[in-house]
Image (spheres, rainbow, N blue to C red):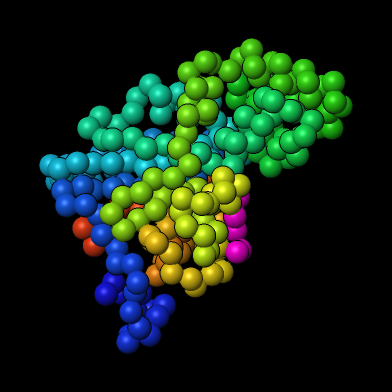
Amino acid sequence: MPSFLKRWMGEDEQVAVKPFVPAGERIYCIGDIHGRLDLLQRLHQLILEDATDHSGEKTLVYLGDYIDRGGQSKEVIDLLLDTPLVGFKQVYLRGNHEQTLLDFLQHPWAVATWLTYGGRATLNSYGVATSLEPSRPQLDDMRDELEYRLPQSHLEFYQHLWLMHLAGGYCFVHAGIRPGVSLQEQRNEDLLWIREDFTESNATHEHIVVHGHTITPEVEWRPNRIGIDTGAFSTGVLTCLVLEGAEQRVLQTGGKG
């Protein structure tokens, strides 16, 4: 039994879902990036260096929230589209921030609060001017300007992001899952937005859930989930979980400095 399970559970308790990855595969899973191109570039380099000793299948899972807060949201998407890591199967998941961008394109006044929790930085990165307290007509103008300036490849990227990825004993989602509900019946809203109902639950899930969305100072190891959103935008620590067989380990950028 991995040591983190022994710390969190009693030695005599059993784990319903054992951590495992299909034979020959190594999974790298990156948490919330939030417009920090510099950290993503650094972490990509760490992943490339780490993967040199693995000749089998390599999968790179991104947990969403590529945009907002940081100043280089557009550039993060450019990097993912133009220079993906060679030799890796890429799995891009959708975060609540990408969903809100899509919602803004449809009904900007309905999600105007997006500007206050990161959307303004994303709009600026695409060259869209914003105001502190926009009127409804101004919101419509911002939406129209974003629609004009957003590359078609970026729009298609946002539209076709996955909500969930399964591999071995793991389920990868952005925010988490609703405890007690089968994976097939999960609501999109929960996969993108859920917090305490998921993070505070000790329920055994069908898979060990790997997620971001909820910021913690360090990786959160639990028998039923692993949280890897270490607040990269403000902390400078972007986390990558590495999974192979039953092994679990972490690669991280170095923090502020």
- Where 113 falls versus 29 (above or below)? above
Tell me if residue 229 can be seen: no
- Where 145 falls versus 9 (above or below)? above
Asked where in the image residue 87 lies, by quadrant, the reply is top left
Tell me if residue 173 can be seen: yes
In the rendered image, residue 194 lying in the magenta stretch gets the answer yes
Give the residue at x 31% y 50%. Answer: 167
Asked where in the image residue 228 lies, by quadrant, the reply is bottom left
From the top left corner, tell me how far across and down residue 28 is, in percent: 31, 46
Give the residue at x 53% y 51%. Answer: 186
Decide if residue 9 is on the left or right side of residue 129.
left
Decide if residue 204 is on the left or right side of residue 87.
right
Give the residue at x 54% y 22%. Answer: 155
From the top left corner, tell me how far across and down residue 143 is, in percent: 71, 21
State which region is magenta.
193-197
In the rendered image, residue 80 lying in the magenta stretch gets the answer no
Quadrant including the N terminus: bottom left
Main SS type for the magenta part?
Answer: helix
